[in-house]
Structure formats: C-alpha cells, structure tokens
Image (cartoon, rainbow, N blue to C red):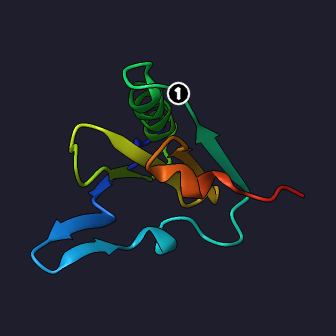
Amino acid sequence: MKNKGSEKLVFPGANTSKGFYSFYDYVIPIDANRIFAIKGGPGVGKSSLMKAVAQEFIEQGFDVEKHYCSSDNNSLDGVVIPKLNVALIDGTAPQSAVTTVETV
C-alpha cells in the first residue's frame, strides 16, 4: 500500500490594516513544468475540481499545497504539487493577471 502524501494549507495573500499583502509571486516556481489556469464563472466548480485533483495526488503519495483565497477561505486560488513542479490556478478575475503564461 502506498503512503499518502501530505496536505499544506496556506493563504498566500491577506488583507491587513496596512493593506493587501501578497506572496503570490512565490507560489509557482518560474521553472514550473506545467501551469494549468482554470477559468469559469462563479459556482461552476473551479475550486471543487482543484480540491479533487489535489486529493487524488495526495492519495498517490504526493505532497500538495492548497492556496486559499484571502477574501473567501472556502475558495481555492491554486494547488501546487512541488515534487512535480506543477500548479493549477484559478485564472478568473481578480486572479486574471496570472493567466498570461508563455508556453514553450
């Protein structure tokens, strides 16, 4: 039986009394193998899809980082699988700035 991977829950951005602080620039490595931007309207299942993908990789023994939205802590902004250097991210507004990703 394969050992399960671990799950790390983080908030890479936060609203504070001094304004918004963001660590999003450090979430996805520049040399990522794959970045999947998931787009869709509210309630179509972007977070649910990312949660299901994350759980599948945990079951397969991979460590997974779940990056939650600072304004809606039930909503995922992204999932990172560090060992594979792969990320799934919410590509809709206000995260639309991350959708401009060059592919080789």
Q: Position of residue 89 (x, y in %)?
A: 53, 46
In this orientation, which residue lies closer to the viewer: 72 or 3?
Answer: 72
Q: Residues within 10 Å of mark 1 (few under 14, many from 20)?
A: few
For the image shown, how many numbered marks are present on the structure? 1
Q: Position of residue 83 (x, y in %)?
A: 58, 60
Please tell me whether residue 94 is drawn above or below residue 15 in the rendered image: above
Secondary structure of the residue carrying tag 1 is loop
Q: Residue at x 39, y 25 (%)?
A: 42
Amino acid type of the residue that numbered disc 1 sits on in the rendered structure = Gly
Q: Residue at x 40, y 32 (%)?
A: 47
Kindly give the residue lying farthest to the left in the view shown: 17
Please tell me whether residue 75 is drawn above or below residue 100 in the rendered image: above
Q: Which residue is mark 1?
A: 40
- Quarter of the figure with the C terminus: bottom right
Query: Does 87 sit left or right of 21 as displayed?
Result: right
Residue 65 placement: quadrant: bottom left
Q: Residue at x 36, y 42 (%)?
A: 76
Q: Residue at x 63, y 60 (%)?
A: 85
Query: Does 66 sit left or right of 57 as displayed?
Result: left
Residue 20 placement: quadrant: bottom left
Q: Position of residue 101 (x, y in %)?
A: 72, 57
Q: Position of residue 102 (x, y in %)?
A: 80, 59
Query: Does 86 sit left or right of 19 as displayed?
Result: right
Query: Does 9 sit left or right of 84 as displayed?
Result: left
Please tell me whether residue 45 is drawn above or below residue 17 in the rendered image: above
In this orientation, which residue lies closer to the viewer: 31 or 95?
Answer: 95
Kindly give the residue lying farthest to the top in the view shown: 44
